[in-house]
Amino acid sequence: MKPFNIQDQWIYPNIQHWTPYILKNLSKINHLYKNNEGIVLDVGGGLAPISDITNLSDYKYILLDPDINKLNLCIKPIEKIQGYAENIPLKDNSIDILITSSCLQYINQYKFFDECRRVLKVGGIIALHENGPYNPFILFARLIQRFIGVFNKEQWKYRNTIKTYYYPKELNGFELYSVIQVGLTTPILLYLQILNIKQPPKLLFILNKIDYYLLLIFPFLKKITFLSTVIYIKK
């Protein structure tokens, strides 16, 4: 087993691993946009793994991240801006869609949503993608992360703050449009990745089928799904 880099192995490849789920969830907003062009802002997007938004290929994609190293590593032909979610360096009412993935635990959420209200156009969209706090596989992974020092004490409070958005209510100035919750057993793949174990053929297909039928038969299990996509529209 080769050693893993804490930052890379626990965070960025993890986000990229779930990109297909995020893109599928994002497809829910395609019909809302009939314009030929617009601007998508990815806040804290790192290497921009979710930049391939279905049917929005003509939209300008802006990647905002405080880490200049990650911005430099991103080879995609998109605009890159070094900056913070709490102080977005863009004009008022200039953004059509704002997306973020696994970002809320690192930022001041109150200031972030104030900035969302400022930069988004009326009718603009926030699409949040976050890990649910109650999935047993994610819970165990986060306990290990806390133990080895990936999260400090303040960041560990993420488990509690995310509950606000896992059971979302209307944000001031926004209408709750959609909540999509997926995945029960698929986080098992995260452990294979961390331990550098080759993923067995068709394992993802099998886990997806298991998840599909479990959620269909037992809807209450949505409370322990690993990924939530919450979409808000600015009034």
Image: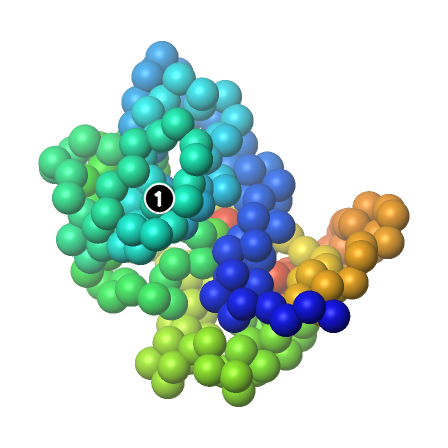
Residue 193 sits above or below residue 161 on the image: above
Residue at position x 33%, y 17% in the image: 37
Give the residue displayed 24% in from the left and 41% down from the top. Answer: 81
Q: Position of residue 203 (x, y in %)?
A: 84, 52
- Residue 182 visible? The answer is yes
Which residue: 36% across, 30% down?
78
Q: Residue furthest top?
A: 36
- The tally of labels here is 1
**Crowd rating for badge 1 (residues with CA inside 10 Å; few <14, some 14–19, many 20+):** few
Q: Position of residue 32 (x, y in %)?
A: 41, 26
- The image shows residue 101, relative to residue 119, as above or below, that is below
Q: Quadrant of the N terminus?
A: bottom right
Residue 186: horizontal and vertical position, in percent?
A: 72, 58
Q: What is the basis of the colouring in this image? A: rainbow
Q: Quadrant of residue 126?
A: top left
Label 1 sits on residue: 72
SS for dot 1 = helix
Q: State which quarter of the image contains the C terminus.
A: top left
Q: Is residue 166 above or below residue 230?
A: below
Q: Amino acid at mark 1?
A: Asn
Residue 116 place in picture, x, y as percent: 23, 47
Is 226 situated left or right of 216 in this image? left
| Closer to the camera in the image, 145 or 169 | 145
Q: Is residue 123 above or below residue 176?
A: above
Q: Residue at x 51, y 56 (%)?
A: 12
- In the shown orientation, is residue 146 left or right of residue 233? right
Whether residue 217 is visible? no
Quarter-of-image position of residue 127: top left
